[in-house]
Image (cartoon, rainbow, N blue to C red):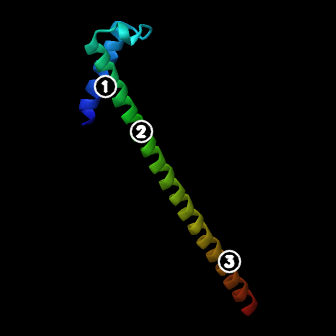
Amino acid sequence: MKATRTQFLILALCVLAGFGLHNNARAYDPQVSTSLKKSKDALLAQRTELLDACDKRKTQITQIEQEIDRLQGYIRDTDRTLKDIDVALTRNN
C-alpha cells in the first residue's frame, strides 16, 4: 500500500510541478483538478496516520519513563538496604 501511495504522491507532485501552484484550480482541466483533490485527500490521510503514530509513540515513551522511574525506585531501595546491611556488619565486627 505504501508503494502505491508513494507512486500516487509522486504523480501528484509531477502534476503540480507541471502546472504550478499559483494557478487557480478552476483553470485546470477537470481531470487535473480531480487528481489534485485526490492528492490532497491522500496527504490528509497520511497526515492523520502520522499524527496517530506520533501519539502512539508518545504514549509508549510515557510508559517507558514510568517503568524507568519505578526501576530507579527499586534501585534506591536496594541501595538503602545494602547500606543498612553494611552498617550492621560494621557494628557487628
Question: Is residue 29 shown above or below 62?
Answer: above
Q: Position of residue 79 (x, y in %)?
A: 65, 74
Label 3 vs 2, first from the N-terminus: 2
Instruction: Give the residue number, with chain letter if any, for mark 3.
Output: 80
Label 2 vs 1, first from the N-terminus: 1
Relative placement, left or right, of 6 versus 77 is left
Q: Nearer the viewer, mark 3 or mark 1?
A: 1
Residue 38 badge: 1
Q: Position of residue 25 (x, y in %)?
A: 38, 12
Q: Quadrant of the N terminus?
A: top left
Question: Label 2 vs label 1: CA separation?
Answer: 15 Å
Residue 64 badge: none
Residue type, numbered disc 3: Arg
Q: Name the residue: 62% across, 70% down.
A: 73
Instruction: Give the residue number, with chain letter if any, for mark 2.
Output: 48
Q: Nearer the viewer, mark 2 or mark 1?
A: 1
Q: Are marks 3 and 1 in contact (CB under 8 Å)?
A: no
Q: Name the residue: 25% across, 15% down.
A: 31
Label 3 vs 1, first from the N-terminus: 1
Is residue 48 or residue 90 the one in the foreground?
A: 48
Splitting the image into 4 quarters, where does residue 62 fall? Answer: bottom right
Report helix, strand or loop for mark 1: helix
Report helix, strand or loop for mark 2: helix
Q: Quadrant of the C terminus?
A: bottom right
Residue type, numbered disc 1: Lys
Relative placement, left or right, of 86 versus 23 is right
Residue type, numbered disc 2: Thr
